[in-house]
Amino acid sequence: MQERKLVAEKEIEVNVYDIDAMGIVSNIVYVRWFEDLRTAFINQYMTYSEMMKFNISPILMRTEADYKVPLTIHDKPVGRCWLVKVSRMKWELEFEIATEDKVHCTGYQKGGFYNVVDEKIAQTPKVFLEI
């Protein structure tokens, strides 16, 4: 098993627009929460404005979500993001959306960085390699 490092954690507010007609959180919302967690992680080390100075942007290559137990608007979930792997050309993250006693969704993303001028995959910034 790979070692993973918790790199972001935040309380999540379930909004009215997050729920479906049955009163549960829509599956696509979890992917948005993964994005919020990934952004919180990245911004700790390098903001998007700083990345643009180097003409790079983070990109996604894969997203997976495993839905376990439905969430409702009454729940108080917490999102967690772990850095599982980082290399010269890509990174891997794992996610968990949970309440106090249940894991509601787990997920995985693989991505990298993209040079917006050269229009090709860029090397992972050194600051992320040192985490």
Image: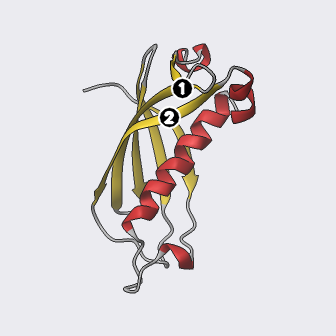
Please, what is the three-letter code of the amino acid marked with disc 1? Tyr
Q: Quadrant of residue 126?
A: top right
Q: Is residue 60 left or right of residue 68?
A: right
**Which mark is first along the chain, 2 or 1?**
2
Q: Is residue 121 left or right of residue 116?
A: left
Q: Name the residue rendered at 42%, 72% in the picture.
A: 25
Q: Residue furthest bottom?
A: 21
Q: CA distance from mark 1 to mark 2?
A: 6 Å
> Is residue 49 something one can see in this rendering?
yes
- Residue underneath mark 2: 59
Q: Is residue 70 above or below residue 5?
A: below
Callout 1: SS: strand
Within 10 Å of disc 2 (Cα), the crowding (few <14, some 14-19, many 20+) is: some
In the drawing, what numbered circle is on residue 114? 1
Q: Position of residue 109 (x, y in %)?
A: 39, 39
Q: Position of residue 53 (x, y in %)?
A: 75, 23
Q: Quadrant of residue 54?
A: top right
Q: Quadrant of residue 11?
A: bottom right
Q: Name the residue rendered at 50%, 72% in the picture.
A: 18
In the drawing, what numbered circle is on residue 49? none
